[in-house]
Amino acid sequence: MIALRRRYGRGLVLGVLLLVMVMVTACAKDTQGVLPSPPAQEESGDQNTAGADNKGEDEDGSSDEPANPNEGNSTGEENSTGQEPAQEEDQPDASNQADFSDAHSVTVLVNKEYALPEDYEPSDLVYPDVRFTFSEKIEKRMMRSEAAAALEKLFAGAEEDGIYLAGVSAYRSHSTQTSLFNRYVKKDGLEKAKTYSAVPGHSEHETGLAIDVSGSDGKCAAEDCFGDTKEAEWLAKHATEYGFIIRYPEGKEDITGYKYEPWHLRYVGTEISSDIAERGITLEEYYNAVPVTASP
Ligand SMILES: [Zn+2]
């Protein structure tokens, strides 16, 4: 009724009522059930609520976010290690809950997008007991204790296979990274410097969990030609067994932000490293590159 009134105005409604009353009296023999119910008008009026389901999928605008591999990737066969392709995308994985945003955690994610806190300094740096390409006991020989212990095992394991590795550069303090970067900027300009050196706070070497390695002869240290050595081959095959990953694998530059660096090892612990090895993914992919700011 109300609907009718809205639609046709009071006059018409009254008219209709009158007519109904006339009809009711006319058909007096059957008074029950004659009252015509108003035309079924449920005023389904606001189409807006019907069917418009807001899924709240607002992309957070951070533009150069690495591609999310779990989205719309039906073929998903890309795999650099030649192991079986990752098939179980989208499966919730409890290990993915490792804390990538805690600078103190060995699982921290540091890349061109995610930086360490300005004042971060590892509290448990030690000198791993392994061969280096230099003999001084200086900063770049240090690593966080858990990573250092794992590195010793890795070097020993390599030797059992006749592979003799040497450390080239491990920990780098924030101030060292800053002066290094500034030197590059002075030499090549900011944009160019950023292509080959990390902005201070964004270098994995500042975590104390990364190390560049070479063969014991130091040949091809931190150079592309290292990729062709038997040492690199061994690392690619076995580093993950010791909790390390080749952090910047071949063909993943658009995800990691770095070209292939077969010499740059990053300690993440065996739980993550074995998962990464199995699925042939990067650390960014492992975390789905969740923004640091979204941490609980
Ligand atoms: Zn490195």
Image (cartoon, helix red, strand yellow):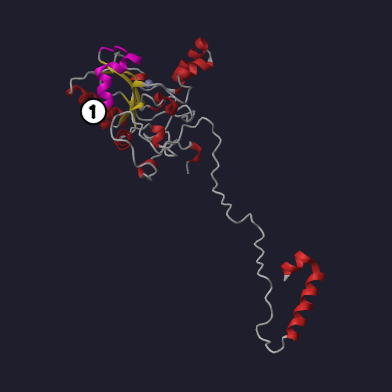
The answer to whether residue 188 shows anywhere in this view is yes
Q: Is mark 1 within 8 Å of ligand 1?
A: no
Residue 219 lies in quadrant: top left
The stretch of residues the image draws in magenta is: 217-237
Percent across and percent down for residue 173 are: 42, 22
Percent across and percent down for residue 120 are: 45, 29
- Badge 1 element: helix
Residue 168 lies in quadrant: top left
Percent across and percent down for residue 131 are: 25, 18
Q: From the image, which quarter does the N terminus lie in? A: bottom right
Foreground: 166 or 69? Answer: 69
Whether 276 is drawn above or below 9: the answer is: above
Q: Which residue is mark 1?
A: 153
Percent across and percent down for residue 242 are: 26, 31
Q: Residue at x 48, y 13 (%)?
A: 184
The answer to whether residue 221 shows anywhere in this view is no
